[in-house]
């Protein structure tokens, strides 16, 4: 057993109810004078973006807001955000929202300091220069994007979800405030919560797991399993919301350093082709892909089961994932309205895109293109 480990995180990670109200002091502390807020239309309508802008203004910072982020953000969203950044002559970015807004904010902040287009940097460690300082304020629990060195941007031209990993994508500060998640409806709570749980599970069984990411992943898995149903049934359960936010942040820190694996590799092509939300496509895949992968690391899956309050048994984990999906009302792909002919026509391409993303390479059991097509058929 090796005790070597490595961890890359934002310099400051603040997980606390009300933390988003500290954004003015935090931005001023970074020496920022002109900030671009990157968010989506919902947060402008609901007044959240306005409240963040007020806090920045009180701290003497000039703000402008770009609210053109769409779910599963595209290269076009990033270009529009960059134009807004240039027009405001911003020296920093505050990203406010779900993973889509955070990922767009990250891409805009690095592209402000790098030549070319964001699609040029798809893959691992290809971004030459650090970007503008970024403060990430998540509103879902969640992608964990506020602490990850990852951004996922859909290439408008190829319809592929590009996975871009680089230390320059790390926010400078993460302000994880569960109070912002109170407005998440049950379906969104369920989908983003299963995304977090998937991060914890995949980070723990990944070939790149290390002792620090193990500690993060196990704690995350326990917190998420203990509180996801509660947050789903009662969105006003603050204790559950708070625990989910911590779990999402820990799981993000784990997978950003240990990688995700086959579930995420197979999930991104589903999102790109059929516009199924990221957390939901993970949820559809998670029990089936976990069952396939068990043989590659049965002891690790058993440890996860135990950390989640189940028997120390890999089968108990898969049973629980099935039960969770049933309770959260997660359908099959067919049940989601994905048309069979369209699905059959693209599933081989999807399998190739999954393999090309690199994530399946860290799965405890390796999967061929044919096996991945078979798994897609199972979840249809
Ligand atoms: N960078 C990473 O490390 C990472 C990790 C996992 C997923 N992702 C990416 O993140 C994106 C998904 O992010 P997401 O699942 O957080 O959803 P999202 O950001 O796409 O938001 C989905 C919808 O929920 C709404 N919403 C968000 N917060 C809300 C709130 N508090 N109350 C009410 N509505 C709210 C949004 O306005 C939007 O309409 C995908 O593109 C995925 O690929 C990135
Ligand atoms: Fe994810």
Image: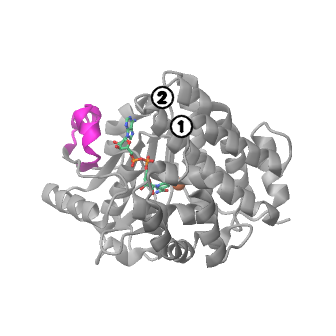
Disc 1 versus disc 2: distance between alpha carbons?
10 Å
Could you say which disc has been placed on residue 245 in the image? 1
**Residue 357 position in % (x across, y down):** 52, 73
Where's the N terminus, which quadrant?
bottom right
Task: Report the disc number at residue 17.
Answer: 2
**Vertical position of residue 348 compared to residue 240: above or below:** below
What is the quadrant of residue 240 in the picture?
A: top right
- The tag on residue 133 is none
Q: Which of the two labelled residues, at mark 1 and mark 2, occupies the earlier sequence position?
A: 2
Q: Is residue 364 left or right of residue 277?
A: right
Provide residue 375's location: percent of width, then percent of height: 63, 65
Q: Residue at x 50, y 70 (%)?
A: 344
Q: Position of residue 176 (x, y in %)?
A: 47, 39
The percent coordinates of residue 110 (x first, y second) are 34, 65
Q: Which residues are magenta?
A: 35-62
Q: Cβ(mark 2) to ligand 1 < 8 Å?
A: no
Answer above or below: position of 24 versus 125: above
Question: Which residue is farthest left?
Answer: 87
**Which SS class for mark 2?**
loop
Position of 19 relative to 307 (above/below): above
Q: In the image shown, does 299 or 242 lie closer to the viewer?
A: 299
Mark yes or no: residue 252 visible: no
The residue located at (34%, 48%) in the rendering is 95
- At x 21%, y 36%, the residue is 57
10 Å crowding of disc 1: few (<14), some (14-19), many (20+):
many
Queried whether the magenta region covers residue 38, the answer comes back as yes
Q: Which one is in front, 328 or 264?
A: 328
| Residue displayed at 65% across by 39% down | 324
Q: Quadrant of the C terminus?
A: bottom right
Question: Which of the 4 image quadrants contains residue 367?
Answer: bottom right
Q: Which of 349/1 is in front?
A: 349
């Amino acid at each position: 057993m090796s005790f070597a480990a490595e961890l890359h995180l934002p310099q400051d990670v603040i997980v606390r109810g009300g933390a988003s109200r500290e954004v003015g002091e935090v931005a001023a502390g970074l020496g920022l004078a002109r900030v671009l807020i990157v968010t989506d239309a919902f947060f402008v309508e609901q007044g959240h973006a306005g409240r963040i802008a007020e806090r920045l203004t009180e701290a003497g910072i000039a703000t402008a807001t770009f609210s053109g982020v769409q779910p599963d953000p595209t290269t076009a969203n990033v270009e529009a955000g960059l134009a807004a950044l240039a027009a405001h002559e911003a020296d920093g970015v505050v990203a406010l929202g779900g993973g889509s807004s955070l990922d767009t904010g990250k891409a805009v902040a690095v592209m402000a300091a790098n030549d070319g287009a964001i699609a040029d940097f798809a893959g691992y460690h290809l971004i030459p220069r650090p970007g503008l300082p970024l403060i990430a304020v998540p509103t879902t629990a969640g992608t964990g994007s506020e602490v990850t060195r990852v951004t996922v941007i859909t290439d408008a031209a190829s319809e592929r979800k590009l996975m871009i990993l680089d230390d320059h994508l790390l926010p400078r500060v993460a302000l994880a405030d569960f109070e912002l998640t109170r407005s998440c409806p049950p379906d969104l709570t369920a989908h983003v919560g299963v995304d977090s749980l998937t991060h914890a599970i995949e980070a723990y069984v990944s070939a790149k797991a290390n002792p620090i990411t193990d500690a993060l992943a196990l704690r995350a898995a326990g917190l998420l399993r203990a509180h996801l149903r509660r947050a789903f049934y009662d969105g006003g359960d603050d204790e559950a919301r708070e625990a989910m936010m911590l779990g999402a942040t820990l799981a993000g820190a784990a997978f950003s350093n240990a990688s995700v694996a086959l579930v995420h590799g197979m999930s991104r092509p589903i999102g790109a082709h059929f516009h199924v939300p990221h957390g939901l496509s993970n949820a559809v895949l998670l029990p089936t892909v976990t069952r396939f992968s068990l043989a590659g690391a049965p002891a690790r899956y058993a440890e996860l089961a135990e950390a989640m309050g189940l028997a120390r048994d890999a089968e108990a984990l898969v049973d629980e994932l099935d039960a969770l999906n049933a309770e959260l009302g997660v359908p099959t792909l067919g049940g989601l309205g994905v048309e069979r002919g369209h699905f059959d026509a693209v599933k081989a391409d999807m399998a190739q895109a999954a393999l090309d993303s690199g994530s399946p390479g860290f799965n405890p059991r390796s999967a061929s293109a044919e096996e991945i097509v078979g798994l897609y058929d199972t979840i249809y």
